Amino acid sequence: MPLYFFNSRSPKAYHPDLGGVELEDIVAVRFLALKTIRELASDPFKPVDYVYWTLEVADESGQTVLTVPFWAAMQL
């Protein structure tokens, strides 16, 4: 299975995913991206304003395959 890296970007920093996750296809990537954003944004112990954050998913070659703004994922 392909390996994907779920990197987040805030207005002030880039937060790389150093481990990656093996997923079957882009549908699974999108599902996990949305789930990850919702979990991060709903943590009551991390009062962070995620409005300007994005989740950038890259494949093993480093190519970005999906970019999701946090605000968009929280709207769904």
Image (cartoon, rainbow, N blue to C red):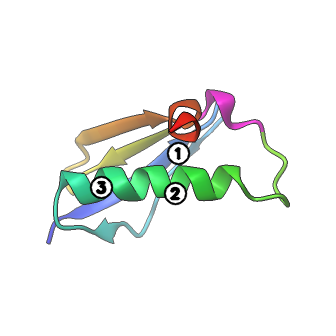
Give how far across and how far down residue 9 sits, in percent: 55, 38
Main secondary structure type of the part rendered in magenta: helix
SS of the residue at dot 3?
helix
Q: Nearer the viewer, mark 3 or mark 1?
A: 3
Residue that numbered label 3 is attached to: 29
Q: Earlier in the sequence, mark 2 or mark 3?
A: 3
Q: Earlier in the sequence, mark 2 or mark 1?
A: 1
Query: Which residue is found at the position 51% from the left and 31% from the top?
Result: 72
SS of the residue at dot 2?
helix
Amino acid type assigned to the residue bearing label 2 in the image: Thr
Residue that numbered label 1 is attached to: 8
User: Is residue 51 on the magenta stretch?
Assistant: yes
Amino acid type assigned to the residue bearing label 3 in the image: Val
User: Is residue 65 on the magenta stretch?
Assistant: no
Query: Which residue is found at the position 31% from the left and 39% from the top?
Result: 66
Q: Which mark is residue 36?
A: 2
Magenta residues? 49-53
